[in-house]
Image (spheres, helix red, strand yellow):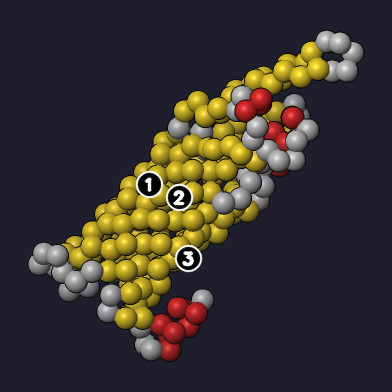
Amino acid sequence: MLFLVFGFSASAQIEIGLMASPTIAGNRFIAEDRYNLEKESNNLYLGVGVIADYFFSQNYAFSTGVIYRGKGGEVSYNYTRADGSGSTVTTRGKDDIALQYIEVPLTLKLFTNEIAPGTLAYFQVGGSLNTKVAAQVNDKKVINGERVLKRFNIFEADVLLGGGVEFQIGESTKLFGGLTYHRGLTDIDDYYEEQFSDKNVSLKNNSVSLDFGVKF
């Protein structure tokens, strides 16, 4: 917000654009080994949205936007425990998690000088505040009479690191392409905590995206 206010006060240049962002997404766990929580596979999604770069200096910009993006992957678990009566109970399963978020990135973009005529490289660092809008598990929106949407936490935050190249193709038109890593910071699901009766279990998103777009 400080960068944004400073940019407006200095009559900063504002560039608005459209972006398409194919994303390879999966999950990571923070949990004890005894639960055998494993990432089985990643999923491919498409993110789309509007971005805005607020330049407060020739080579520095505050970058934000509104992006609709899918996240989640396939995970499995297999946990055997004693039930107190001399026998054991096994909890196992495999979940294909598919989530949809509206993301608001809050990042700083650092641009180089021209590395070729009309061509700049950029580096991007910051975070993203995300709101869940849809959810499925194993291609189902309702399981055992309960909406899957309620299983997942509404808000998510992640750290964002990336870089790319920007090409000037007209007086005010630019094309860009880059690679971005999104690392989830917050627990997205309390389901596994309840399954294992362990409050220390957490599930977080991880994804890598290819970003392509045009700015005006």
Image disc number at residue 155: none
Q: Secondary structure at mark 2?
A: strand
Q: Quadrant of residue 171?
A: bottom left
Mark 2 or mark 3: whose residue is earlier in sequence: 3
Q: Residues within 10 Å of mark 2 (few under 14, many from 20)?
A: many
Q: CA distance from mark 3 to mark 1?
A: 17 Å
Report the amino acid beneath label 2. His
The percent coordinates of residue 113 (x first, y second) are 19, 71
Q: Residue shown at 65%/51% (left/top)?
A: 154
| Contact? badges 3 and 1 (CB < 8 Å) | no
Q: Quadrant of residue 203?
A: top right
Residue 97 seen anywhere in this rendered image of the structure: yes
Image disc number at residue 182: 2
The residue where tag 3 is placed is: 106
Report the amino acid beneath label 3. Leu
Q: Residue shown at 66%/26% (left/top)?
A: 35
Is 8 in front, or is 182? Answer: 182
From the viewer's perspective, is residue 99 above or below residue 131? above
From the viewer's perspective, is residue 98 above or below residue 13? above
Mark 3 or mark 1: whose residue is earlier in sequence: 3
Residue sitting at the far top? 87
Q: Residues within 10 Å of mark 1 (few under 14, many from 20)?
A: many
Q: Secondary structure at mark 1?
A: strand
Q: Quadrant of residue 33?
A: top right
Quarter of the C terminus within the rendering: bottom left
| Contact? badges 2 and 3 (CB < 8 Å) | no
Q: Secondary structure at mark 3?
A: strand
Left or right: residue 15 compared with residue 118: right
The residue where tag 1 is placed is: 209
From the viewer's perspective, is residue 200 above or below residue 67? above
Q: Residue shown at 40%/56% (left/top)?
A: 161
The percent coordinates of residue 71 (x first, y second) are 50, 42
